[in-house]
Amino acid sequence: MRNHSHTEPVMNTRARFLTLFVLATILGGLALTPLQASAQQQTEIALTPFSIADGIRSHLSEAQLALTESKAGAESAFSEARALYDGDFADELATLAPDADTVVLGGFAQAEQAIDDNAPVALAEARSTIWTALLKGSFGVVEISIEQGDIATAKQWLLLREYRRATRFARPNADGTLALLDMASGTLTQTGALVAVRADLLDGYQARLDEALRGMSAADGQGFATRRVEYASLARGYFGILSDAYEQQQGAGALATANAAFEQLVAAAYSGDGLQDARAAVQNVLHGFRAAPLTPQEQQRRAGQLLRYLSLVSVEYGRGIRDGQVALDLEITEAATFLEGALVAFTDLENTLEERDQTTTTEISGLLTTLDGYISDAASRKAVVSPGEVSAAGQRALDLLGATMPAEWQKHDSAADFDVINAVLDQMEQAVAGGQYDLAESSRLEAYSVLESGPEARLVVFAPELKVPIEDLFWFGQGENKGLAALIRDHATLSEIKATRTALDAQLLAASKVVGGTDEPVAVGTNAAIIVFREGLEAVLILASLLGSLKQGANRRFRTPIWWGASAAMLVTALTWLLLRSVLSALTRYGEMLEAIVSVVAIAVLLLITNWFFHKVYWTGWIANFHAHKKRLIGGEAGQIAGLVILGFTSIYREGFEVVLFLQALVLEAGVGVVLAGVGLGLFGTFLVGLIVFALQAKLPYKKMLVVTGAMISAVLVVMVGNTVHVLQVVGWLPIHPLSIVNFPYWTGTWLGIYNTWEGIFLQLAAGVFVVGSYFLAEKQRDRRSHAPRAEAVASPELVTGDR
């Protein structure tokens, strides 16, 4: 019994153990199955053309490093690289791009021999040869796949490529990828996609060729022989990718000469002798060659960048120099950065400029080199030339560019404006990172002035819904992100400023797509007409209302001061136009503040005049003691005249200032003639509105006409208050409390001054209450005085007016 009783628990324990083991095995197998499948999927995903080629490059780099210490390690890394190449990848490359496969195999043979000979320089050459051959092979596979309509293969192999190196002025180009997406969606033909992909890749590889040549020279200067050969071999390989385009443009004989020049370059890099002569020969065969010629639109954008960046070089340099010494390093750095952008743009345009005027282009190149030397010397404290010298050299270059560039290149380019805005916002972030918040604010204002004096003119017509959020993010913000002005004022952290910058970048990207449309005269003229009509409508309604209420009796004399003020505003608006031609950026950076000040004055005067009209003009027929109380009317006769002059002036100029900014930007884009035609159309529409208003007034009985006129003034006042509150919030002079219970569409702000803030709604209601209150108060006074004894009027007959 003891044995049995002892055995049973043991058996039960074993049974339980076996059961648990089986269950664990089953569950473990179930758990491992998706993991194994996932691992298999990851392996399949990893084995793309790009990952294989990148793996080959990595293993060859490991072999290069290992060769100096362990030949066995180099051989092992080389074997892994060769194993990655063999298989489906090599088969597909050999089938679709056999020439590239031949070069790759030759490179592997050279690499293997270099490891056997313990020759790191030869291995560096082989690595560059293999990598550039893989890039060329990928290019060929993509071309054939597009021609065959195999978008999936084209997409996969297009990942195996190189881009222009990203800078603050040039982001990696995605035209090839976008072209394949458009081809897949049916919005682009195979031919169109092939042209776009070729242009994208050729442009990138020519940029890489230039970088390789510069890298080779730098390595030579540092005495790095292995790196010198590596860069020379890369240059030769990149040219191999461009060789078909070179032959098409220059001919087979020229291609043979160019290939020989690159072979000589690699040989000179090996020996270290005659490298400068060899590079000069390469530069000579490349002179005038552009693998992917720029489109007219790209040329105009590069020209816009060149002119914009070059004009900013002397501005930044001048800010950084005080008393012959560098006072602000950041400003000198920015001057160097803008000059770099100008040089990149000039390089892209140089060949075309030389075709137009080689002598002038050579002089421009020399001036840019001189500027580069000035700024480099200042940055290194080697020498500091005066800001005047830098400005003179820059202006001379700009003058020569203006004389050499085609007229279409010199039209204002909004895309270049957005490039400048991004660059200056980068400068703002750098200033914040360095704790220089005053410089950050200066950069913010500079970026905003570029926006307001350029792209905003188009934006305000074609996508006004984007104007408000962009302004908010530049200034004090009304949404999830605080505005940059508020953040800089509060010395916010760099991460907070970057968060707002990210939101702003998204809005600017949307804006750039909108304003990047046609510059046809009809579009620009229509743009100008809409701006003038919309901004002028408010002023016309005020003037028409006021003048219409001053048509009878002694009140007619008050029409003249209003016309004086309006005429003065038109004159000052014209002077502002002329002034902005020379100091545009200096004033536009404070444009919102100036608009806010003028608007506040206009509202104050309009409130005063409205109250006066209700009490002293609208009810003239019932007020017999007008002359007795005239000294109380806005400070007496002189006060009346001054108030009406100010009202006429502010009613026109507050709109005129903003119109001038917008029209100035359009003039830069399309010229004075087109814009003036649009202005004429807009003024004609505004004039018609004025005639209609006066015609309606003339048909109404006097009292009803005055009531209608009062209603018009009241409506304009409410709109003006809403717009002014918004501007005051934009510049941070009023607090912002978003209205969450309702979200008004953008057009309510554009046309009615209604924005989603409590302050705006409250003050608009307050303005309306003030006007209505003035009306009822005037009615009450009229009723009281109408029941006054007639004897008062008889006792004082001189107080009775004839304006009944």
Image: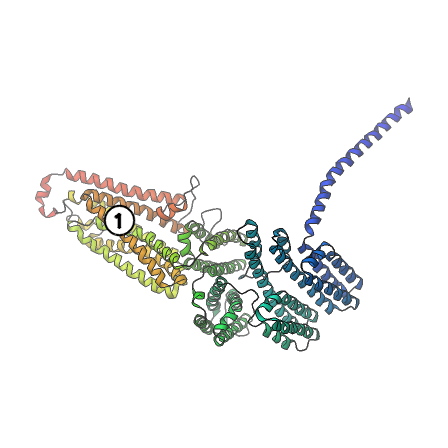
Horizontal and vertical percent for residue 249?
Answer: 57, 69
Drawn side of residue 218 relative to residue 409, left or right: right
Of residues 674 and 725, the one nearer the viewer is 674
Secondary element at image label 1? helix
Drawn side of residue 606 relative to residue 412, left or right: left
Drawn side of residue 619 relative to residue 480, left or right: left
In which quadrant of the rendered view does residue 562 lie? bottom left
Whether residue 671 is visible here, answered yes or no, is yes
Classify 554 as above or below 416: above
- Residue bearing the label numbered 1: 608
Classify 478 as above or below 198: above
Q: Residue at x 72, y 61 (%)?
A: 60
In which quadrant of the rendered view does residue 795 lie? top left
Horizontal and vertical percent for residue 86?
Answer: 74, 57
Which kind of residue does numbered mark 1 sit on?
A: Leu
Q: How is colour applied across the structure in the image?
A: rainbow
Image quarter (top left, top right, bottom left or bottom right) of the N terminus: top right
Image quarter (top left, top right, bottom left or bottom right) of the C terminus: top left
In which quadrant of the rendered view does residue 572 lie? bottom left
Classify 712 as above or below 83: above
Drawn side of residue 441 relative to residue 7, left or right: left
Horizontal and vertical percent for residue 793?
Answer: 10, 43
